[in-house]
Amino acid sequence: MTTSTPLLSVRDLAVSFPGRNGGAPVRAVQGVSFDLDAGQTLGLVGESGSGKTTTGRAVLQLQAIERGSVHLLGRNLTTSSAAQVRGMRRHMQFVLQNPYSSLHPRMAIASILAEPLQVHRSVPRSAIPARVTELMELVGLDPGTLQRYPHEFSGGQRQRIVIARALAVHPDFVVCDEPVSSLDVRTQAQIVALLQSLQERLGLSYLFIAHDLAIVRHVAHRVAVMYGGHIVEMGDTAAVFERPGHPYTRCLLDSVPVPDPQLQRQRLAQVPLEPDFRAHAGGSGRCVFGHDHHDGPAWHWLGPGHGVSCRYWPPDLARPEPVPDPTG
Amino acid sequence: MTVHNPAPLLRVQGLTARFGRGAQPVVKGISFQIGAGEAVGFVGESGCGKSVTARALMRLAPEGSSVELGGSVLFQGEELLQLGENAICDIRGRRIAMVFQDPMASLNPVMTVGAQIDDIVRRHTGVGKLAARQRSISLLDQVGIRDAAQRANDYPHQFSGGMRQRVLIAMAVSCAPDLLIADEPTTALDVTVQAQILRLLMRLRHELGMALMLITHDFGVIAGMVERVYVMLDGEIVESGGVDAVFAAPQHSYTRALLDAVPRLHAPGERP
């Protein structure tokens, strides 16, 4: 859709873990492809075990991959040497779910924030204290608390420290893995607002991994839905939430509790859709939309930039009406 | 209205809880009631005292602490705060049962799931081993665990998060309690599993005619599940009322702030 090269480009990414006791390997991520433009957020949603965290780790080269490629700022990370990847790390950072385990309990906040600056030598040694103070202000914390330790801060404040540490080296791209799921609703809203304002001010790109669809709706420009290691639907956020094309996306959306008693009672009274989406994985011949993709990817475009996997479809569901495939 | 108003199942008056003598109370003299078969929600953020309140009803203290309780907790006419340890043990699990947030931490990792349910059934009903196991299997079946007879021989780590929560619910309802307290029962679960667990709780509530006290920080979870809501802030109840009224017209600014913070799946006016 964009003519310029995307900031991040992931193609056919696959990750496997060796099976236990000599069993079959676990194929955690299978053939995942997506692009992310500068200043944009891609939401990655799915249930636990869908491969969304492994995808984030593989993109950051924290996880050995089986095949595929990851291009960041035009550089192919998957073929780069370890030293080259280390050099690229200042462009890509990570915000993790649990702000309790991702901060060293015996390091003062000042040292926690100075560490990435020292490692990447991104500012002169003499400028580190000034940069650390600036980072505290950036995430809305009082620089007077720099000598305190993580346990003296609340969960929301710790997550602000984790974000400040990620931003210390001026990254272009941040993977946020469930950044607010361990926080209270009001704190969640504050952290989400902080991430959004930082994106606007600094032009950051986020890969926003979350199981909470309502939050993803608020932060993401585009959304990818993962199931069983595959992306089963991807498109602009409004399109995916308003016109979900894949039955699994609909199943996820129907499960989200809504803060409206009458509506929520109706939703809970409905018989849940629990189809087995694995049943029709792969397969050959015509896809569920009646198209023959030959040897091309099993991907069906529903509209501009909005597509679904047409191979991963439960057989017990009614097949969709054949629609013209813009690419086919 | 002059409707005959039977005594509530649970009437709490001026409940206080503090950790240690002379400490600041974390629950500051709250009063509420739950009718027989009624579902009531408690909403608040971490640290507001909602979990301490729930545990106080069963005279339980958070792990590694001792709690000093004051006020009155009348359950079916009995003053729970005055009961001896043996008497309260007979009420715990049999007449008031509880489901916690973290199912793995609530299950014994080295005992099969069936054996853990057998224990509860035998403790409270005094039936023999075989009868207890039969009851356990039918309970697992009731909470939607397939091949219950086989799964009873499995250990907790062989179950998924959602299935473990079902096991905990099976244990909690094993003696058909009059009140089930569920403290953030779905917080650690995926949305699809969360919906399944909420449906299960609702079905069991109707099948067993038990009252439900549902504690959560998520107004979305409360919405379809309860008739009345109490909103807690800093150890006090700041708002209470029928669930539809509280959602439609919250009176307290804190309730409004909590409701506003819930991210919406759909833009206003858009069809869900």
Image (cartoon, rainbow, N blue to C red):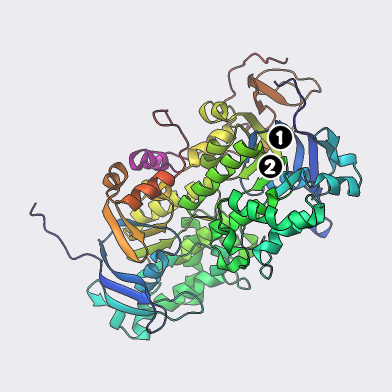
Looking at the rendered structure, the kind of residue marked 2 is Gly
Q: Which mark is residue A281?
A: 1
Q: Chain of mark 1?
A: A
A18 within the magenta span: no
- Residue A228 marker: 2
User: Badge 1, how many Cα within 10 Å: few under 14, some, many 20+?
Assistant: some
Residue at 74 percent across and 54 percent down: it is A127
Q: Is residue A270 magenta?
A: yes
N-term-proximal mark, 1 vs 2: 2
> Do the numbered discs 1 and 2 sit on residues whose CB atoms are within 8 Å?
yes
Q: Which mark is residue A76?
A: none
Residue A177 appears in view = yes
Q: Which residues are magenta?
A: A257-272
Give the residue displayed 75% in from the left and 29% down from the top. A6
Residue B212 relative to residue A250: left or right: left
Residue B218 is left or right of residue B14, and the answer is right
Q: State whether residue B163 appears in this view.
A: no
- SS type, badge 2: loop
Q: Quadrant of the N terminus of chain A?
A: top right
Q: How many marks?
A: 2
Whole-percent x and y of residue B215? Answer: 40, 59
Quarter of the figure with residue A328: top right
Pinpoint residue A221: horizontal percent, then vertical percent. Answer: 60, 31
Residue at the spot 43% in from the left edge and 55% down from the top edge:
B217
